[in-house]
Image (cartoon, coloured by chain):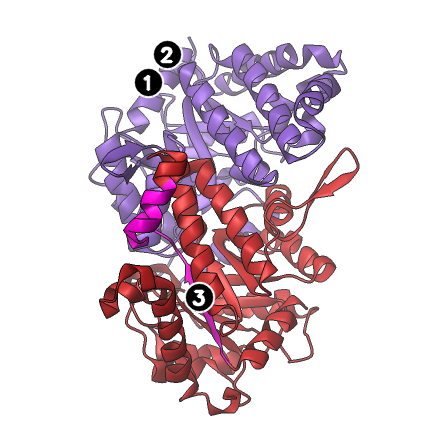
Chain colours: A red, B purple
Amino acid sequence: MSLDRMIAKIIETGNPTVAGLDPKLDFVPEFIKEKAFAEEGKNLKGAAKAILEFNKAIIDEIYDLVPAVKPQAAYYEMYGYHGVKALYDTIEYAKSKGMFVIVDGKRNDIGATMEAYTNAYLGSVEIDGQSFEGFGADALTVNGYLGTDGIAPLTAACNKNDKGIFVLVKTSNKSSGELQDKLLEEGGTIYNAMGDMCEQWGADSIGKYGYSAVGAVVGATYPEQLAEMRAKLPHTFFLVPGYGAQGGGAEGVAKAFDEKGLGAIVNSSRAIMCAYKTEGCDEKDFAKAARREVIRMRDDITAYVPALKK
Amino acid sequence: MSLDRMIAKIIETGNPTVAGLDPKLDFVPEFIKEKAFAEEGKNLKGAAKAILEFNKAIIDEIYDLVPAVKPQAAYYEMYGYHGVKALYDTIEYAKSKGMFVIVDGKRNDIGATMEAYTNAYLGSVEIDGQSFEGFGADALTVNGYLGTDGIAPLTAACNKNDKGIFVLVKTSNKSSGELQDKLLEEGGTIYNAMGDMCEQWGADSIGKYGYSAVGAVVGATYPEQLAEMRAKLPHTFFLVPGYGAQGGGAEGVAKAFDEKGLGAIVNSSRAIMCAYKTEGCDEKDFAKAARREVIRMRDDITAYVPALKK
């Protein structure tokens, strides 16, 4: 039922968006990098410190406006285990501010190993009788190519620990159709089949807003498919990447929502993190610029989703 | 061309197997855990120390016999960033012993983010003009659901840095067929389509043994499909999970090999790591028991792949 927690935050803020935290070092203002390098060295540890400070400053400026953050694991793993510590610290900080945290890891594996990923992100491990959370996220993006026994450990944890998952269905990238759009002999496309599996996987966890703990990733860059999926998958909440930088507009994105203004949360990463570059303002003003972009994005999208507007 | 390095090691050792390092704390002998907990505490850091010491002792006993190790990222991430540091240290240690290191992470994402994963595992990041490797693996397992632009950054790194990838084609788990076996309107199955993409993605990186840098994961639990894929994908090297614990036998696994005894590397994880439990020997003898299992497995498989036998 965990997506209920997220949906409640969306309603509370009147904002169906999630801030992607994909902090390449190039996105971080010089003054933050200089301080971090001075403290930790010009190395992976210094880089990790810089991206953590960058994230925290952005979170401080947006947590009252945005219901959720979505750190993308790749950008932390790039800086080795120091970067992964920055991922942990970012998750902890965002949760301390009341934000819902979706780790974008697109994890996937078979049963026993998927349990380990589940424990890492949505559960805990036992060490000599005591429980420890590896990352303590609220939700995780996953890839369903391996079928039900790669998903079952996750749905068990969703029910036990009040967490959620988002399964890749139709991604936002150009080549997403190469496999996902292929037609099946039984009818429909591969992404249709994956979407149908999401409805099945979520059937036991439908919450008070009508959506299950098993969401789907459906890209903003394919509005017709958003509309098609919204109609076909009434209990599956959508995480929608591809707005802004990748070309998806608010009018298209609006097709992901139901008539109550629910059913989707739209991600933006670079446009928020790099708002100070786009604006051309002083780099010291980067977090305020992120806040301005967050407000612009909220107003852009809710103009087409009036039911949610506060 | 990186798989040439791996293939050369296979020929040198006469052993087409890879030792999976999936160290659940339950697999680690008590005396190692006690020492690690005494040094680092009964917490994630202590657990990470225990699994690293366990891995190192196994590597010390098998590196002369086995060409490669495959640490499974999930089992390290489960212990948080301390676990991820143990992954890094395990990779570094195995490489120092001359082993080829395949990180089993099944990573997948769109272009820009896949570049970050590529940099993390098969490349490096620039920090103020200096290069740093996040994990420094030789190869990475990946999921191709997102199509070519999720794979292109990897193949570029394979060519530039002499690395390899293994794309999930037909996995070893029970429910793998739910999606992967579906028939396409154009003919063939989804896993056939993914296999064909592997041949295409690897077309520019075919090495001296006839195999490209783009391998495929094809489970030992489906021998007919192994044979089918071996015939259809002549330039795609197979990473074969599911031998032993998951039920795949040597006779079936043999179908993954070509007439020269090449074309596949067979994974075993639990049977090696927990050999001391299966044998019932003293737990202090765990690494020697792993060595005995490695020899048993090599002889079991090469009995059906005589061309490779030394």
C-alpha span from label 1 to label 2: 6 Å
Q: Are marks 1 and 2 in contact (CB under 8 Å)?
A: yes
For residue B270, side relative to residue A13 (left or right):
right
Question: Mark 3 to mark 1: distance in Å?
Answer: 47 Å
Foreground label between 3 and 2: 3
Q: Which amino acid lies under the numbered mark 3 shown in the image of this protein?
A: Ala
Q: In the rendered image, which residue does mark 2 sit on?
A: B12
Observer-side mark, 3 or 1, equals 3
Secondary structure under the numbered disc 3 in the rendered image: strand
Q: Of A158 and B187, which appears nearest the observer? A: A158
**Residue B250, image x, y percentages:** 55, 26
Which residue in the structure is indicated by mark 3? A19
Q: Nearer the viewer, residue A253 or A195?
A: A253
Asked if the residue at tag 2 contacts the one at tag 3, i.e. Cβ–Cβ closer than 8 Å, the answer is no
Mark 2: amino acid: Glu
Query: Which stretch appears magenta?
Result: A15-36
Q: Relative to A258, say whether A282 is above or below.
A: above
Q: Quarter of the image containing the C terminus of chain B?
A: top left
Give the image quarter of residue B67.
Answer: top left
**Classed neighbour count for the residue bearing mark 3: other residues with Cα under 10 Å, few (<14), some (14–19), many (≥20):** many
Residue B272 in magenta stretch: no
The number of callouts visible is 3
| Position in image of residue A287 (x %, y %) | 38, 64
Quadrant of the drawing holding the N terminus of chain B: top left
Q: Position of residue B247 (x, y in %)?
A: 63, 34
Q: Which residue is mark 1?
A: B8
Which chain is home to disc 2?
B
In this orientation, does residue B254 appear?
A: no
